Amino acid sequence: MTLALTSLSKTYPGRHGSSVQAVRSLDLRMDKGEIVALLGSSGCGKTSTLRMIAGFESVTDGGITLAGRRIETLTPDRRRVAMAFEGYALYPPLTIEENIGFGLTARGLDRNEAAKRVREMADMLEIGPILKGRPAGLSGGQQQRASLARALARDADLHLLDEPMGQLEPQLRAILRGRVKAALKARGLTAVLVTHDQTEANAMADRIAVMEAGVLQQYGAPSELRDRPANLLVATFLGEPPMNALPATVEPHGLHIDDVAEDALALPGVALPAVGSKVVLGIRPHRLHLGAGVWRGQVISNQWLGDQAHVVLALGSRIVVAVAHQRVPVRVGETVPLGFGAEHAHLFDAASGRALAHGTASA
Amino acid sequence: MNGLDIHGLRVAFGRNELLKGIDLTVAPGETLVLFGPSGCGKTVLLRAIAGLEPAARANVRIAGRDVSTLGPESRGLGMAFQNFALYPHMTARENIASPLQARNVTPADIETRVNEVAALLRITHVLGHSPKELSNGQKQRTALARALVGKPKVLLLDDPLRNVDAKLRYEMRLELPRLLRAAGAATIYVSQDYREAMGLADRVAILLDGHIAQLAPPEEIYDAPNSVKVARLFGDPPINLLPCRPVAGPRGVAVSAAGWQINLAVERGAAGRSCLLGIRPEAIALSQSEQPGAARAQLIATTPLHERLVVLLRAATGEEVVASVLGAVPPPGSAVWLMADTTHALLFDAESGARIPAVAQMVEHAA
Amino acid sequence: MARIDGTGSPIPRILRAIALVVVLVFFLFPILWIFLMSFQTNETILAIPPSLAFTPTLINYTSLISGHLQTAAGSLDLPFMHNLFNSVLLSSVSVLVSLVLGVPAAYAFARFRFRLGEDIAFTLLSFRFAPPLLVLLPLSLYFKDLGLANTYTGLIWVYQLICLPLILWIVRGYFEDASPDVEYAYRVDGHSWWRAFTRIAIPLAGPGIAAAGLLAFIFAWNNFVFALILASADKQPVTVGALAFVTASGIQYGQIAAAIVLSIMPTLALALYAQRWLVEGLSLGAVKG
């Protein structure tokens, strides 16, 4: 175990004596060589957590252990962490090359070794041509890559990456995610990635911690979050398009989907709660199949996106989305049968959102 | 012409000519997505159409009326901004009512119209809130309502979904086509997300280096981009571009790249020239055993992308290749064989970047 | 490892409190002393050693307000209340004129790039760099020729040297801080540029305009040199009027103290009332301007 956050809390004083709890009693453990993503929408507490680990924000309560040392009271320079800032934070008077190399030679790395490291980073992040330039003349995307290179060039106990690819062109982002992940793995580095972009978290992290309103919602491998989401919030936050969520009521013979005039659905292998319970049925769009099944949906739109089709259907008064990986020959206005395998169903408590049961495919 | 008609639109800041003569026509009810890398001038183009860009020289006609010399308040268009641009000191209701108030609509009519458009965008319950009390999704809906309330002939939407989270963005992407159809305006929609462009557009205009590089339905842009730059813009992960030097083949040219031997039904003039072979990542399949026609490669890293896996590979011949596959893949470091579906493979001239056109009679075969 | 936070040792907290008290005493003691002096007669003020135990008297205030001062050397007429009126008039009219001229100018500098724009803005700011005495001599000559010497109009004009640059640069920062998109949106809605300026730009820069106006008022109020040279007794503000207490028979410390207390009242009240805007406005102006 490399990083351990124990009951970590952050409270900011608010106006008129009130206070805002940005992070509530967060417990998180990560192993050496692991990449963990803190994922959540803005204001969920992920950035406060990162800043507490880096030492830019005091800890209200709880502790931080890094590589066997308690670090929550140390100044940032003594924590042995490297950070890529969302706002780049490059030193304006230095060239990009000097920006990246500065921290290396300052920490006693030999000049040749440092120069070699800078070149490696420049190649990986495609900033070779701008190494001699200064930050002021560069685009946001270039500065962001320079900032990322500076953080990754260092040997630290922990690398903190704050929205490291937010400003990059989408074309470059897809490639760099793979390269940065491979580089971290090759050097056995441990990294915390803060992002609001689930695609980035999924692409790069070994484990994802989903946060909302300062509370950790679920912590696990991307596949675990996808297949066994702990609650409706995690279920609909992850996945694009988001999970279809249909309010339903448990009946003696199965599940009755509210506002959809169909017979009760039997869900073999899914443990239904007591009859009368209000639940939400969740089905991922690519598990919804067109052409066969118990439901009849009217096609609202059928979009081909180059590598996948998104079909939107009206199901009673509900709207659902189905994704297929080849073109679907249905027209707008047409009524088509659709269905799903019970093994891909997820059930959530309607009031609390807590997961009640998952289909057998999730086991 | 009833919709929007732009002719010879130029914008120069000093010596730097950002837009070098843009011609565009958008029909009523049509959604044209303006697509391009950041900094290419998409926002400036919208501003020029709206009359907000003093450096613009253009001939702009809206519903046949020449508005080129009119101020933004007299052009009669609706606009939504990337940062919402709501009036912070007014309630959502007052924000939405603003275009109507500018036109001496009676208070009773304003009330009715605002309520109508708010119901359409499902923000009736927050009409009394000030912008800072609204969530990002509600802000964005309020901004759209304000653009739609005056029933403008032309709608300019500047990446309105950029600053809302993924879930809301997707919901709006589903809702927008219906809203825009109901509005019936000639719509220009700026986007940086190619999936959004493919989902919303009747036609896509690719803006590059101050020109419209390609203007076509979204599927045509995806399947037949007319240059390397356009090809790279559409697709996530982006298209693989492999250097090659084709030779004349039986029905076009034969290409050897990354270990593949591929016959392409394109014009033979490409033979002997330095070219780039374009293969979409989803057209590449992986196998752990040797297959006929497959290229050897080493798997470097795997990154999940929605339901797919993006696989970064190094071909035995040295090129970096990206594949986007469904299902499981072997661990990093494994040796794999790559099979390419060449139905939609593209060939570009390496120097000019232009796509080598298909041989005319071969088109049926390919389909 | 020792933990240093709210629940730990109280020593740092005590040290902090002591430091705070020292700073407060250093800055507030003179004000307190003046306040106490204003309730004493010259005799108790000049007593050695000074004593905090005295019988408070309102004589200083009554003489200021009635305009008559009885001293050992005889009776003296004091135009103090008239000076106070002059200060109010000069400062508020100057600030109003500066706002009318400066806010639209600040908007122009923030929104439009025009030839020599930066140079003009900088020139206006540079009025603040020049020592007042440098411009005073030529100005007093011009003012005599133009008939502006010893007029309210002339003084208000000169006070623009103080108020206008301040308002221009603070308010400009505020306008630059607001996204022009909000005004663009209002224009596209169908409103004229004038309405966009008055209904959107000005309300959004409101706190900055208030802060700049307030600061300009305080600077104008505290001005001494311009009024000393360019105005005679009946147009002089309190800062100059206070000189009258330095009489042939000695310095009237009690009256001076009372005059100071009275003259800082308006600005103090204004500053306290608008404290929030002032801090917010100044810090933003500092960053942006």
Image (cartoon, coloured by chain):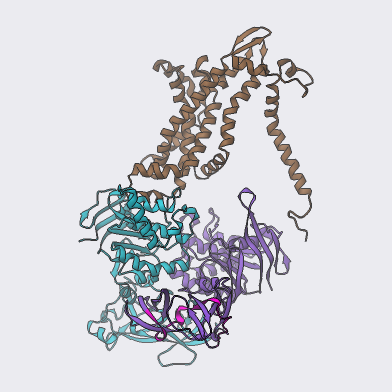
Chain colours: A purple, B cyan, C brown
Q: In the displayed structure, does residue A323 sit left or right of residue B76? A: right
Question: Where residue B177 sits: x, y (%)?
Answer: 34, 68
In the image, residue C30 sits, relative to residue A313, either above or below, namely above
User: For the image shown, how many numbered marks are present on the structure?
Assistant: 0
Question: Where residue A263 sits: x, y (%)?
Answer: 45, 84
Q: In the displayed structure, does residue A198 sit left or right of residue B70? A: right
In the image, residue B83 sits, relative to residue C93, either above or below, namely below
Q: Residue shown at 29%/77% (left/top)? A: B356
Q: Is residue A179 magenta?
A: no
Q: Is residue A289 magenta?
A: yes
Q: In the displayed structure, does residue A83 sit left or right of residue C162? A: right
Q: In the displayed structure, does residue A352 sit left or right of residue B188? A: right
Question: Where residue A188 sits: x, y (%)?
Answer: 62, 75
Q: Residue shown at 60%/14% (left/top)? A: C66
The C terminus of chain A lies in quadrant: bottom right
* Region in magenta: A269-297
Question: Viewer-proximal residue, C266 or A154?
Answer: C266
Question: Where residue A181 sits: x, y (%)?
Answer: 55, 74
